[in-house]
Amino acid sequence: GKKPLGIARAAAALSRPVMGISRDSQHKRRLTGGKKPHHHKKRKHEMGRQMAMTKIGAKRVHPVRCRGGNIKFRALRLDTGNFSWGSEVCTRKTRILDVVYNASNNELVRTKTLVKNAIVQIDATPYRQWYEAHYGVVVGKKRRADDKEEEKKKLSTRSQAKITARQEGRQLDPNINSQFDTGRLLACISSRPGQCGRCDGYVLEGKELEFYVKRMAKKKK
């Protein structure tokens, strides 16, 4: 007898060749608007792959064999990265807490997707600890006088001289200081998590920080 309509459709779909993701320019028109002739089918070297759509979570990285036997590292989930504080020349491994802005697509913010040039919030603790040890100055939340006295360590004359010398050129951006209060710093991802399997970047400062704070404030309105 005849096959039910649903089964027939499913069988037809399975028999059809599956369309792959292609990066070719065969299907595009010429600059003048004319159509190009189709003189070959899809080729392996024109192949594309699905997006990594890296999320925040316990580290999960898959190796992908590429053209020429090279290997890409497709990060599916990451929760830490190396972020550089440029003006202080301080790089620390820290936790990635949230995605707050993406110039290309708001959907990537909603789904907390880690991509290059996304603006993220990172844990400020490693940087605060370094700053306090390097300059001997407490940043962030103002502590009680009793706590400060308890935490004061006796330094050698040489160490004290070093810290005093560092005080001369010290200048902390007020915007970064206010971020230390919240325990989170704004940073920009400069690596490509879907290609190299890492989520590294730099802490936002100066004009760039001001620009992104304004953009985020505008989006909230």
Image (tube, rainbow, N blue to C red):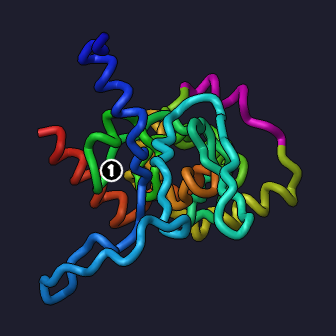
Residue located 54% across and 29% down the image = 143
* Nearer-the-camera pick, 121 or 32: 32
Query: Residue 111: horizontal and vertical position, in percent?
Result: 36, 33
* Nearer-the-camera pick, 184 or 100: 100
Residue located 65% across and 34% down the image = 59
* Nearer-the-camera pick, 165 or 89: 89
Residue designated by label 1: 102
Q: Is residue 80 left or right of residue 190?
A: right
Location of the C terminus by quadrant is top left
- The chief SS type of the magenta part is helix
- Placement of 185 over or under 5, stated as above or below: below
Residue found farthest to the bottom: 32
In this view of the protein, can residue 135 be seen by the observer? no
Q: Is residue 34 left or right of residue 170?
A: left
* Nearer-the-camera pick, 139 or 128: 128
Residue 149 painted magenta: yes
Location of the N terminus by quadrant is top left
Q: Secondary structure at mark 1?
A: loop
Magenta-tinted stretch: 144-154
- Local packing at callout 1 (Cα closer than 10 Å; few below 14, some 14-19, many 20+) is many
Query: Residue 94: horizontal and vertical position, in percent?
Result: 63, 42
Residue 204 painted magenta: no
